[in-house]
Amino acid sequence: MTSMLLTQNTNVITRPFSFILGKILEGIFWFLGLFTDYPSAGAAIILMTIIIYLLLLPLTVKQQKFSKLSNKMNPELQAIRNKYQGKTDQDSMMRMNEETKLVYQKYGVNPSGSCIQLLIQLPILWSLYRVIYNMPAYVGRIRNVFYPLVTNIVSSSDKETLTEFFKDFSGYSYYQKQFTNDLFGTRTAEGIQHTENTVIDILNRASTVEWNKVAEKFPTLASQVTDASTELGKFNHFLGLNIGLTPSFVLKSEWASDTRNWALMLGVLMIPLLSALTQWINTKLMPQPEQSNNKKAEEENPMMSSMKTMNTVMPLMSAVFCFTLPIGMGIYWITGSVVRSVIQVVVNKKLDKIDIDAMVKSNIEKANEKRRKNGLPVEQISSNAKINARNVGSAPVESETARKARIDKSIKDSTEYYNKNASKPGSLAAKASMVKQYNERSNSGKKSE
């Protein structure tokens, strides 16, 4: 038996999130149902998206703070890369990694900080996508629309008949695995449930033409087909659009019709266009790399290059996806971009008020306090700590005499510290202290070379 792929999300990682989000969505439908007999699925998607992004706000703020500080650090990181450019020996690589780590430490940034925030958000947002894409699986009010029609279709047809009939439907390719599952078409309780879920998945994305095919295939169920498609249309109706259909399908159908509805065609075309526009605005509001005087370094910076590419590609990809996916997904995509843009404006204003120099000073004090607790002498985090991110490359170069003096002082401080805190001569603690002194001297020499 192959693994089941039912209407609800069964992915081990995202399933718990989908379950919780599904309950939230059903709660939204209940709330909207207090004001109307047929709550709009489009309105529910908008409210759902806003709620989830507001819940993710703390993570979003942290991620944007990381991006903002990354832009401040990038000139210093680029200066370090330029300093060791062409040097591939192990010692140079170690020193470059150490200096890079100290810059991150100076700004109080975890190099993997942004990745962590994304890893937490991705399963939630992917689960939200799955819930919106499969509303009948999570909203009982929509799911009940398909009964008793689905029960009668499954009970009156065998596996081969259902597969042959539905293979030409627009949703078949997405749910093909459910048709090839060993449970599909079987008469066990589990098999009937799986088969009914599969038929609901297909009918949930069926066009008017495909609903008419169902009525022709099952003439005795024609009245039930009409009732189900009409009720589903009431839930899916939003601003004159059927959110269960794709813009590409609507445009193709209307273009082939003798009486073209130009208003409808313009309406569905606005979905991918608005998606691209809001995505573009969102990328422009994101923290951008600061301009430096070294244009060549900017061009060679892989981070800046990839960001520019993403800012161009993402809006185009958004338009393509929203043109081929159901309109409901386009509404979700547009709403998400608008909410992110509003949040970004607020976060940018907040981050612009941060005193970077005061923050760097605080981080240096924290780092030195950590060194004290670890039994290490206090030292300057990095010579770059005195360099403002906007002025990298213009700072004075440390002289050889000053460099040697700094190394000697670091060794002297280290020796005095350990001599002061070492136990009796010959003891285990004293021997450990000698090892620490040696390591401290070695590390100080490597950092300064």
Image (cartoon, helix red, strand yellow):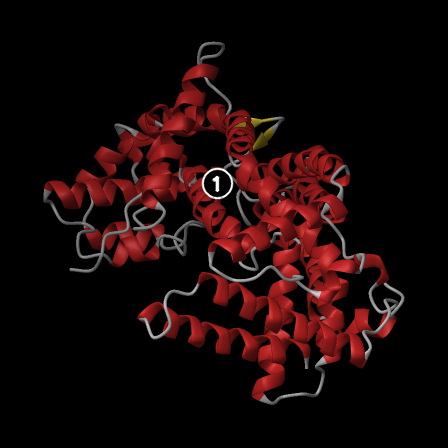
> Is 153 displayed left or right of 116 in the figure?
left
Q: Which of 37 and 405 is in front in this view?
A: 405
Circle 1 crowding by C-alpha within 10 Å: few under 14, some 14–19, many from 20: many
Residue, x 30% and y 35% (percent of image)?
219
Q: Which of 298 and 214 is in front in this view?
A: 298
Q: Give the image location of residue 269, x and y in percent.
A: 69, 43
Quadrant in the rendering for residue 9: top left
Where is the C terminus found, in terms of image quarters? bottom right
| Image location (x, y in percent) of residue 369 | 55, 51
- Relative to 224, residue 77 above or below: below
Depth check, front residue: 136 or 16: 16
**Residue at image coords 39%, 25%:** 26
What residue is drawn where x is 10% and y is 44%? 188
Amino acid type, label 1: Ser
Q: Quadrant of residue 232?
A: top left
Q: Circle 1 is placed at which residue position? A: 207
Up-down relation of residue 148 to residue 165 (above or below): above
